[in-house]
Image (spheres, helix red, strand yellow):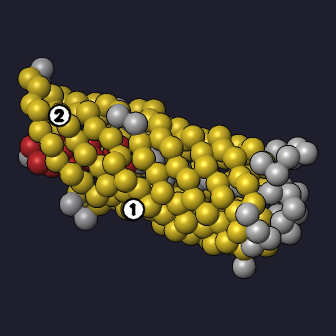
Amino acid sequence: MFKKILIVSAITSSAFISQISIAAADTVDSGLYLTAGKGKGFENSVHGSINGTEFSTTGQITDANEIGIGYESANNWRFEATYTKANSDVDSVTIDGTKYDIHMNGTGHGVRFAVAYDIENDSKFIPYLGGSTLISWSDDVDGISTSYGVDIGISAPFFDYLEFWGAISLSISPDQTNKNVSYDGTIASGLSTGLRIRL
């Protein structure tokens, strides 16, 4: 049961990284593109209960990677779907008021659907705002988790077919229950960066 608490916490924390960043310079024509990114989360706490026993954990996403495909419309909107794999490290767990210092690694997977809007300006650096929904899971825990992301980022083209992006991201996870494990809603943050290749 103790191990299950830690793994569930890892999945919860993995929902806040690998935020999708969808933007491109306005010099690029509309069409399909491939995207790949890497991210890291800031330390975050997760609270919940299992079979009526309250717990809280502290941890962070240590490494997250994503690949996906997107479409850029002619009116500055971006649409994207990606697969994400995130590794998390749980530093401590508190059960019924007793804190245990323990380090446990977990791996979560996710599928994210996102939309973003480029803010045009006279620079080659194009800021954007984005929103997304992430559905995540793990082989070690039954059930899935859902979170919602908000991105603030910037894109910069290198060539006609290649551009760089970076983002600061927030992830909002509502109260959720996976079988006998319930956890409270949380807001987490992270950084991500990557490349976009036009097809």
Amino acid type, label 1:
Lys
As helix, strand or loop, the secondary structure at mark 1 comes to: strand
- Sequence-wise, the earlier of marks 1 and 2 is 1
Classify residue 18 as left or right of residue 77: left
Name the residue that disc number 1 marks. Answer: 85
Residue 26 position in % (x across, y down): 86, 57
Q: Residue furthest bottom?
A: 199
- Give the residue drawn at x 21%, y 51%: 105
Classify residue 56 as left or right of residue 84: left
Q: Is residue 155 above or below residue 181?
A: below
As helix, strand or loop, the secondary structure at mark 2 comes to: strand
Q: Quadrant location of residue 187?
A: top left
Q: Which label number is shown at residue 50? A: none
- Give the residue drawn at x 21%, y 60%: 140
Name the residue that disc number 2 marks. Answer: 92
Mark 2 Cα within 10 Å, few/some/many (few <14, many 20+)? some
Amino acid type, label 2:
Ser
Q: Residue furthest front?
A: 158
- Give the residue drawn at x 41%, y 32%: 186
Q: Residue furthest right?
A: 122
Classify residue 88 as left or right of residue 148: left
